[in-house]
Amino acid sequence: MGIPTYPSKATLFIAFLFRDAVKVDEIMILLQEQFGSVDCSYGPIPFSFTDYYRSEMGDDLQKLYLTFARPIQRDDLAVIKTYTNELEQRYGRAGSRMVNIDPGYITRDKLVLASTKDFYHRIYLSQGIFAEVTLHYRKGLFRFFSWTYPDYKTPAFLAFLSKARARLVKDLRGE
C-alpha cells in the first residue's frame, strides 16, 4: 500500500491576453489583491500566434505572463480558475471576452495550466475545471508536447519560465 504524500507548494502563473480597450491596471490590482505581489513578468507582447481568439476578442491582442511571489497549494487551481473566469465575465462586453486570463502553476518539473475544456490530455480537478501539463522540465530545459501552445515554445517565454522556476527552486531549498 502506498502512503499518500502532499506535494510542495507551487508558483502561481497567469497568462493574460487582452485588447487595448481593457483596463489592464485595474485587473492587475484585483489579481494582486487576490494572489499577492507579482514576482516575475514577461510582456506584454503582440499576440499573433493563433487566430483562435480573433472572432471573439478582435485583432491587435497583447499577452502578459506573470508569476506571483506567494506560493499556492496545487489543489487550489480550480478555485483560482473559477475566480479568473469571473474576472473575464466582469470585463467582457456583449457576451464576448475582452480579456482571457489563464492561471496555472510552476513546479520543479512542470508548468500546469487550468482549462474549462476537457480533452484526452487533461485531468478533471473540480468545479468544471481541468488541468494539463503544458511543459515539463528535464535535463535543464523546459520541453513541450504536441498540445503545447505556440507562444509557450518561444525562447523568450522559456527564458522567463526558467527564471521563475529558479526562484521557486531557491525558495524550496530555503535559501
Image (cartoon, rainbow, N blue to C red):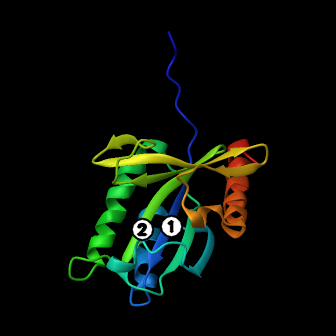
SS at mark 2?
A: strand
Please indicate whether residue 50 sits to the left or right of residue 138 in the image. Answer: left
Query: What amino acid is at disc 2?
Result: Ile
Q: Position of residue 61 (x, y in %)?
A: 47, 82
In this view, the residue farthest toward the top is: 1
Note whether 12 is above or below 24 in the view shown.
Answer: above
Q: Are marks 2 and 1 in contact (CB under 8 Å)?
A: yes
The residue under the point 56% across, 44% down is: 9
Q: Which residue is mark 2?
A: 101
Q: Residues within 10 Å of mark 2 (few under 14, many from 20)?
A: many
The residue under the point 68% across, 50% down is: 143
C-alpha span from label 2 to label 1 = 6 Å
Q: Position of residue 53 (x, y in %)?
A: 40, 74
Query: What amino acid is at disc 1?
Result: Ala
Note whether 146 is above or below 31 in the view shown.
Answer: above
User: Along the line of sight, which residue is nearer the eye, 45 or 32?
Assistant: 45
Mark 1 or mark 2, which is nearer the start of the sequence? 1
Q: Which residue is mark 1?
A: 15
Q: Which mark is residue 87?
A: none
Q: Position of residue 3 (x, y in %)?
A: 52, 16
In this view, the residue farthest toward the bottom is: 21
Quarter of the view holding residue 54: bottom left
The residue under the point 42% across, 50% down is: 77
Quarter of the view holding residue 99: bottom left
Note whether 78 is above or below 53 in the view shown.
Answer: above
User: Along the line of sight, which residue is nearer the eye, 128 or 165?
Assistant: 128
Q: Residues within 10 Å of mark 1 (few under 14, many from 20)?
A: some
